[in-house]
Amino acid sequence: MNTAIPSSNNSFNSTFQDFIEYPKSGILSKVLLKDNNIQYTLFCLAAGTEIDEHTSTRNAVITVVEGAGNLNLEGKDIPLVPGVFIFMHANAPHALQAKENLAFVLTLSEHVSAKKKISQQTIDIVKSTAPILKKQGEKITTRMYEIMFQKHPEVKAQFDMSAQANGTQPAKLATAVYSYATHIDDNKALKAMVEKIAHRHVQTHVLPEQYPIVGECLLQAMKDVLGNLATEEVIKAWTEAYQLLAEIFINQEQQIYESVSN
Ligand code: HEM
């Protein structure tokens, strides 16, 4: 069945069966509903499909609708049969196998970590670095790419190296870092920027596990360029702030990856 997916602007009711549709092989996923905090995705897996071990940045609930399979959650096997309800904490490793055609709903809730932890003091410190980032931003990001390509040459393949050589990409990153410093506590102001960058990241196959690499190189570049101005306090605040920004991107990119795999 191929029922149109409703929008979250109006109430509606339906049954999961209206949306279930199995591919000949592999996975068919449909975002049934999504708002700012939660996303319901129906996964239909053909018998025999396996999903290798991975993690999610958001807390998640699996609700099995029909079929049979197995979930390995943090090393423990859990049979997937209709009615089973499983809560998976963010970052819990899990792998999945469909023994028969299997349909389940994955509910992703708002991710919890850095956003809740970031303090007003951190926000104030990060904001106080905005003027220096405006002045020295491009020097910092040029240095950051220099460090990254030296330490992690494998990431070069994802970049357009002419945009590095003519300074376009370091300039774009500097603008993004500066905007983040000024709007760290205003997600609405960051939204358009985050969406645009996330789309570019998905086009260039950026993965969650690459964020710590960029973070480490960016912080090192701040230290190299800012010298004494990069106090312990400033570095600590930017470490937390970067983690939060990384989570925002990872989350946004996960949604795009999921929607393009539909
Ligand atoms: C919070 C951290 C990050 C920020 C603020 C950021 C920022 C940006 C910006 C502003 C762009 C340009 C987008 C456009 O052209 O419209 C971009 C592109 C890109 N970013 Fe990131 N990024 C981050 C993390 C990462 C990570 C972890 C990687 C993985 C290696 C990465 C790889 C790329 C690539 C490959 C491009 C395309 C560059 C090209 O066209 O040559 N970024 N990023």
Image (cartoon, rainbow, N blue to C red):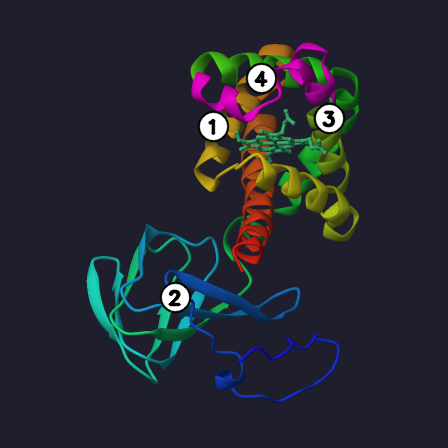
Tag 4 near tag 1, CB within 8 Å: no
Which residue carries the number 1 mark?
213
Is 209 or 135 nearer to us in this picture?
Answer: 209
Q: Earlier in the sequence, mark 3 or mark 2?
A: 2
Name the outermost residue toward the front: 24
SS type, badge 2 = loop
Which residue carries the number 4 mark?
145
Which of the two discs, 3 and 2, sits closer to the camera? 2
CA gap, disc 3 and disc 1: 18 Å
Q: Amino acid at mark 2?
A: Lys
* 81 drawn magenta: no
Image coordinates of residue 5 in percent, x first then y, are 64, 75
Is 145 or 185 nearer to us in this picture?
Answer: 145
Which residue carries the number 3 mark?
172
- On residue 261, the disc is none
Is 134 or 1 nearer to us in this picture?
Answer: 1
Q: Earlier in the sequence, mark 4 or mark 1?
A: 4
CA gap, disc 4 and disc 1: 11 Å
Whether the residue carrying mark 4 lies under 8 Å from ligand 1 is answered with no
CA gap, disc 3 and disc 2: 43 Å
In the picture, measured across the screen, residue 32 lies left or right of residue 43, that is: right
Q: Quadrant of residue 262?
A: bottom right
Q: Earlier in the sequence, mark 4 or mark 3?
A: 4
Q: Earlier in the sequence, mark 1 or mark 2?
A: 2
Residue at the image point whose x is 73% and y is 16% from the top: 136
Q: Amino acid at mark 4?
A: Tyr
Q: Amino acid at mark 1?
A: Ile
